[in-house]
Image (cartoon, rainbow, N blue to C red):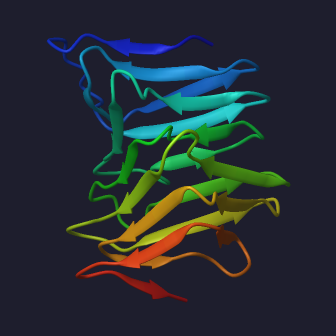
Amino acid sequence: GGNWLRNTNGTFTHNDRLVTFTGTTDQTITVAGGGIETFGLLQVNKTAGELRLSSSPATDVSVAATAGTALLQMNNVGALNLQGQTLNIAGTAASSGISVTGPGVRTVLSSPGTGFVNFSSAAANREITSTGGGTLTFGSSVVVNLNTAVNFGSSISTIQGQLRMNAGGSVTA
């Protein structure tokens, strides 16, 4: 697979569709000039390497479907590297959040710099689910912000960095 590059003046309309990153080499999501790229559903299905948010120009990502399953799907061993940027798990799809498929550990990390994962929703709680025994680790340089209720799943999630409960945020079973 290749990198994702959107011109600052360009428009990407996600229509609640899935965008999948595959392959064995590092790939980068970039908005030329910096900004936010919004996907409906995002899948990291890399057998090696990382999916990276661009640090220069600074590119944040929002996953914001109004329908569908998990907003972020981590289906293979490739990591998601925030590189000091922000990943927003937003949208209004009911009970959606992050899914982990298959055995092994999936990782959200941030190197260099501190990265942020923001869980929010005006309409639904968020959850992290696993099929096949996989787990999800948020690395030591990742701050997880809860702005809504999040179910991290029984023995599925590990937060090595910080967990912040903001207004409206809570952890559910």
Rendered-image quadrant of the C terminus: bottom right
Asked if residue 39 shows in the view, the reply is no
Q: Residue at x 85, y 54 (%)?
A: 103
**Residue at the image point whose x is 19% and y is 15% from the top:** 8
Name the foreground residue: 49 vs 69.
49
User: Residue 90: which quarter of the image?
Assistant: bottom left
Q: Is residue 153 left or right of residue 4?
A: right
Position of residue 83 measured from the top left corner of the image (x, y, whole percent): 50, 37
Q: Which one is in front, 47 or 117?
A: 117
Which residue is rendered at x = 72% and y = 18% of the image? 25
Residue furthest to the front in view is 113
Percent position of residue 156, x then y? 70, 71
* Residue 81 in the figure: left or right of residue 37: right
Q: How far from the left and from the top, in percent, is residue 114?
A: 47, 51
Location of the N terminus (image quadrant)? top right
Q: Residue furthest left?
A: 9
Choose between 164 and 119: the one closer to the eye.
164
Q: Is residue 125 left or right of residue 49?
A: left
Q: Can residue 38 be spotted in the picture?
A: yes
- Left or right of 9 in this view: 84: right
